[in-house]
Amino acid sequence: MLVYLDHLNARSRYTFKTVFKSFLQLEEFQLTKDEEKFKTHKGPKLSYGTKKLENELHFQASSLLSKKGINEIKVEVGLYKNIPTLFPSQNTQGAALPFDVFSAVFFMLSRYEEYLPHRRDQHDRFMAEEGIAFKHQFLQTAVVDRWIILLGKLLEERFSELKIPERKYKHIPTVDIDNAYAYLQKGVLRQLGSLSRSVVQMNWSRLQNQAEVLLGRKKDPFDTFNYLLNLQKKYKIKPIYFFLLADYGINDKNISYQNRKFQGILKTVADYAEVGIHPSYASNSRRKKLGRELRRLERIVKREVVKSRQHFLKLKLPDTYRNLLDHDIAEDHTMGFAEYPGFRAGTCTPYFFYDLDEEVERKLLIVPFQLMDATLKYYMKLDIDQAKDEVQKIVDEVKAVKGTFISLWHNESLSDAEEWKGWRKVYEDLLNYAQ
């Protein structure tokens, strides 16, 4: 496959490599801006520019991929075959699609809009409501995957010798461990403080549960690790666990990484599943903390750790990703929203980070997640039946494009106790439906 471009630069190289290799799984293609070479090429070819050169498969280009830097841009939204589109073409004569599919892909994957001025929430996060997908009601559509599926069909129809490998749907469950225990292993002062809060709030059921756990009469509700292991065996899943090993702080309240019980849990989990670092809330303002937390985890599990997900989903571009790269993290699972389920980058396919400030592709694989337990319960305030419906909608969309469904759950939400009573059923239904 030979691709002609009016402008051959870092953005266009990244976009075409991502589309053809990461999504369409086509290894053999070349980019050129040599018109003569393009015209004499005998194999499959397509052009991307402002005009069609001859009788090739042509895609109309807007100006996004030819530019450098971050500029305020007005992105129009269209509709093609019931799929929302970006950068609709003004002149579609001779174009294979009525929108600039490559600029649309780059805009979504680079998270261009997150570099532009916008409001941030109380945790300094980009809010879903600020994004084009939410504003135009396609946050729950995997638009990037759907655009590239359209592109793939066009290529196969035009070039009979071209066979695009079939995508395979998969589900990777992930579990964040913010608090290994609800009551145990937290020291006398923290336990007394927790007991006092229950008394002040007159939460007698919680007080009773806490007392029974501390007296050894009942299992700590957050200790759901055997339950998770049994689910792993039952559904033959390969989960990833992200552990918080932070110094104690207002937003980082796990038990001490030096605690032997906690280390025992971590080692046991690491024997049966992949583990990654859950960089602390504080590591976002004090970057060296990430290195210390990562070394703690690696010392406990006695292996290199290269996967991460930010605690509180704190993601600020490009700073967060640069910090991860500085500490040799190769794969991050933070790309998603706390407030709503859906597709923050428009996709359920892993892809590499493009640093817009530096105009360069970085070797950090971004693995988007689509659904989180706290989103359903705390942000959307759904009951159990409504949560199950929301889960199925998201899974159906990922299955439709044969993408990778990433669910985000917590050990505490599987306690089946207090505020999470009944939510085990939501998770087990999710595993059953997703498999």
Image (tube, rainbow, N blue to C red):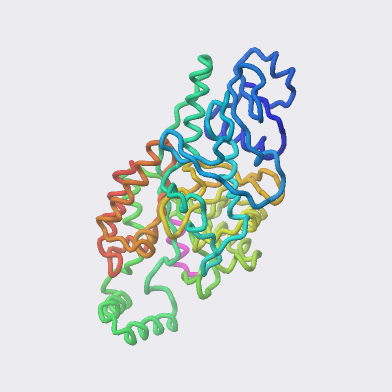
Depth check: 375 or 202 in front? 375
Residue 352 vertical placement versus 315 (above, below): above
Q: Is residue 389 left or right of residue 248?
A: left
Q: Position of residue 108 (x, y in %)?
A: 55, 45
Q: Quadrant of residue 212?
A: bottom left
Depth check: 138 or 234 in front? 138
Q: Position of residue 9 (x, y in %)?
A: 72, 36
The part of the chain drawn in magenta is 258-268
User: How many callouts does the rendering have?
Assistant: 0
Q: Residue at x 29, y 84 (%)?
A: 202
Q: Is residue 362 left or right of residue 234?
A: right
Depth check: 101 or 322 in front? 101
Residue 274 vertical placement versus 16 (above, below): below
Q: Position of residue 155 (x, y in %)?
A: 52, 22
Q: Is residue 272 visible?
A: no
Q: Residue at x 41, y 84 (%)?
A: 193
Q: Quadrant of the C terminus?
A: top left
Q: Majority secondary structure of the magenta segment?
A: helix
Q: Position of residue 15 (x, y in %)?
A: 62, 37
Q: Is residue 409 visible?
A: yes
Q: Quadrant of the N terminus?
A: top right
Whether residue 411 is in magenta: the answer is no
Q: Residue at x 48, y 57 (%)?
A: 128
